Amino acid sequence: MELANVSQHLAVLRAKQLVSNRKAGNQVFYSVRDPLIIEALNLMRTYFHTHLREALGMLDEMEKPLEMVR
């Protein structure tokens, strides 16, 4: 990713108080403010992954020739 894009994304996350930052010299370190955020993101990833599998399964069924479906 471009450094400018990363910086903009981090600025949005900081403005929404999802991450905090700490400066050390010319470096800035970011961390998630609350472990619940990571837990929520993991739950959302699991949810979408499960439903992606279901959608892919339906697409696979649709691609089968009609004789095999009957």
Image (cartoon, rainbow, N blue to C red):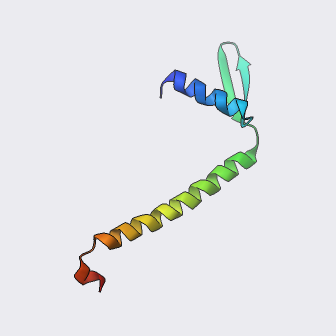
- 58 vs 30: above or below: below
Q: Residue lying farthest top? A: 25
Residue positioned 69% across, 52% down in the render: 39
Image quadrant in which the C terminus is located: bottom left
Q: Residue lying farthest bottom? A: 70
Figure quadrant of residue 60: bottom left
> From the viewer's perspective, is 51 left or right of 57?
right
Residue positioned 26% across, 82% down in the render: 68
x, y percent for residue 44: 61, 55
> From the viewer's perspective, is 43 left or right of 70?
right
x, y percent for residue 26: 65, 13
Residue positioned 59% across, 24% down in the render: 7
- 46 vs 5: above or below: below
Residue positioned 56% across, 27% down in the render: 6
Figure quadrant of residue 28: top right
> From the viewer's perspective, is 20 left or right of 6?
right
**Total labels drawn:** 0
x, y percent for residue 34: 76, 42
- 7 vs 60: above or below: above
- 69 vs 59: above or below: below
